[in-house]
Amino acid sequence: MRLMAANDRLIWIDTETTGLEPAEGLILEIGIVVTDLDLRYQDSFHRVLWSSPGYDKYVTEATLGELVWTMHTSSGLITEAVEGGVDPTSVQEDLSEWLNDLMVDRTEPMCGSSIQFDRNWLEYHMTDIADLFSYRNIDISTIKELCRRYNPVIYGRLDEVTQPQKLHRVIPDIDDTINEFRFYRDNFLFDAVSGEWAE
């Protein structure tokens, strides 16, 4: 992979967790995809997390609740975690090394969908990883809300054009987010092909 400067790439992050509050839960899966500014894939990192004893005490139907338990069992995440998940400390070490090899620094924002959610979990559970990035976010959910309000006609075509998978697994979800951003870039923000502002 060719190393790109911070202003030549986007680093997309997603986590799957046991709930909404970092202090009360665990990260089950983390994924990162690096693209260039044209949204072409450059590199990726993916791990499923599990540590026993520890995770098995907190990852049960009773502790997660029906909604989260059903989501993570339907996606296969819990089975994959139990059968082959990696200790969180090892994941953080591997991810830190990988990001350092990419020369990620504090000029680079985190990119993703509702990315502040993922940032909060990293700040609580993987502080060393969160500290590598800028405090700034590129949040596709913000663009979604702006498009819905300022151009509802374009917004109405979103799912038809992008056909999101909505699998609740980190790499497919990042793919969905990148496709969504591509839709906004080309139809709501700026047509990168023609170089003209979208109407």
Image: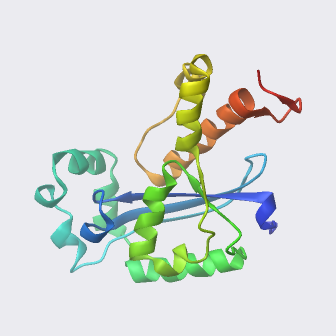
* Residue 6 coordinates in the image, percent (x, y): 76, 66
Q: Nearer the viewer, residue 156 or 87?
A: 156
Q: Can you name the residue that lies furthest to the right here?
A: 195
Q: Please, is residue 139 above or below residue 28 in the view?
A: above
Q: Please, is residue 119 above or below residue 190 in the view?
A: below
Query: Number of marks in the image?
Result: 0
Q: Quadrant of residue 44?
A: bottom right
- Going by the image, does 145 lie left or right of 56? right
The N terminus sits in image quarter: bottom right
Q: Can you name the residue that lies furthest to the front here?
A: 150
Q: Nearer the viewer, residue 11 or 43?
A: 11
Type of colouring: rainbow
- Going by the image, does 190 lie left or right of 89? right
* Residue 145 coordinates in the image, percent (x, y): 52, 35
Q: Quadrant of residue 160?
A: top right
* Residue 142 coordinates in the image, percent (x, y): 55, 42
Name which residue lies at 54% across and 27% down.
148
- Going by the image, does 57 lie left or right of 99? left
Name which residue lies at 78% across and 46% down.
38
The C terminus sits in image quarter: top right
Q: Please, is residue 190 above or below residue 12 in the view?
A: above
Q: Nearer the viewer, residue 144 or 25?
A: 144
* Residue 82 coordinates in the image, percent (x, y): 28, 66
Name which residue lies at 42% across and 42% down.
167
- Going by the image, does 166 lie left or right of 143? left
